[in-house]
Amino acid sequence: MMGLFLEDVDEGLAVDLGSYHFTRDSIIAFARKYDPQPFHLSEEGGSRGPFGGLSASGWHTAAGWMKCYVKANDAARAKLEAAGNVLPELGPGPGFTNLKWLKPVYPGDTLRYSCRVTGKRDLASKPKWGIVFSMNEGINQKGELVYSFEGKVLTARLPSP
Amino acid sequence: MMGLFLEDVDEGLAVDLGSYHFTRDSIIAFARKYDPQPFHLSEEGGSRGPFGGLSASGWHTAAGWMKCYVKANDAARAKLEAAGNVLPELGPGPGFTNLKWLKPVYPGDTLRYSCRVTGKRDLASKPKWGIVFSMNEGINQKGELVYSFEGKVLTARLPSP
């Protein structure tokens, strides 16, 4: 996670992941491919739907978080690497919980995403890895919390000497 | 849900959502846009990554479920409508929990998705709606469970006469 070994990830570590802008075109393009419900496809469909207008697929909101997470992660790794650090292998995320779409995301909205470490634990089955738990959020340009989930990601331990 | 009012959705109702095929091109296209980690972008990156080869973003696996869900839902609604039924308004999903990516998804894999109702409850805050809970799965062509999550979706009650 962020180029850090498990030993260097502490509860409370908070990372601003940057922002993702939802254009009308990107909302419709995502919906056509993966979530073609009328209120994600056009203003007309949106006006008849539950959100009073065209709005982004919740999975698009989720994918925007991932995009920002990877970018922030790459930047953090590049910086550590440039300073001569040996970095941990990238670990996958086995899943997450309590994902909430709290408010609609409309064309022109920009979400700022963040990731805050809430805990970590060892993995009995994988002695070289631990799990880092995080609370992740997306906040729109009005400061409203529109998206959150509790994530977990495998994170490599410092190699034993 | 599936064109049914809350009163007609019963625990145990199971829907085959159909299948989604993951091509090399679609895996890389999704990753470029939303999850550009090396093991989702090329065979080379995949061979150095945690899954031993190019594999789909977990968010792509999730989006594939959504695509199938919308298609199955549309088909169910069309059938009920053709039979002269009045259908409920579409309700959004406020979120879900316990999402698990259990196995990697590789180019050429086909996931068959399903949705099984596990319960429902009234909504004190929204008397015209209830929540339907479901267990959702994705199974690959070898019969392996690779993806699951517990969903919830707002579902309209029968209008009072």
Image: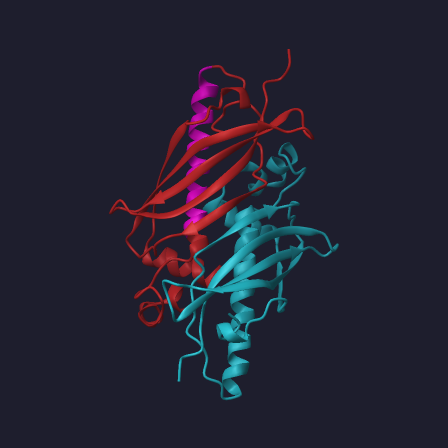
Chain colours: A red, B cyan
Please say whether residue B28 is visible from this viewpoint. no
Please say whether residue A115 is visible from this viewpoint. yes
Q: Which residues are magenta?
A: A61-83
Provide residue B17's location: percent of width, then percent of height. 60, 66
Drawn side of residue B22 relative to residue A3, left or right: right
In the image, farthest residue toward the left: A142
Provide residue A83's location: percent of width, then percent of height. 44, 15
Examine the image and state in which quarter residue A17 appears.
top left
In the image, farthest residue toward the front: B124
Drawn side of residue B95 relative to residue B40, left or right: left
Q: Is residue B139 above or below residue A125?
A: below
Q: Is residue A49 or residue A56 the one in the foreground?
A: A49
* Quadrant of the snapshot with the C terminus of chain A: top right
Q: Is residue B27 or residue A104 the one in the foreground?
A: A104
Provide residue B89's location: percent of width, then percent of height. 41, 74
Examine the image and state in which quarter residue A117 appears.
top left
Q: Residue at x 62, y 17 (%)?
A: A159
In the image, farthest residue toward the bottom: B84
Drawn side of residue A43 relative to residue A61, left or right: left
Q: Is residue A57 magenta?
A: no
Provide residue A82's location: percent of width, then percent of height. 45, 18
Q: Is residue A32 above or below residue B78?
A: above
In the image, farthest residue toward the top: A161
Drawn side of residue B96 relative to residue A145, left or right: right
Q: Is residue A94 above or below residue B150?
A: above
Q: Is residue B8 or residue A84 the one in the foreground?
A: B8
Q: Is residue A81 magenta?
A: yes
Q: Looking at the magenta stretch, what is its main secondary structure?
A: helix
Q: Is residue B93 or residue B110 the one in the foreground?
A: B93
**Count of numbered tags:** 0
Q: Residue at x 56, y 58 (%)?
A: B65
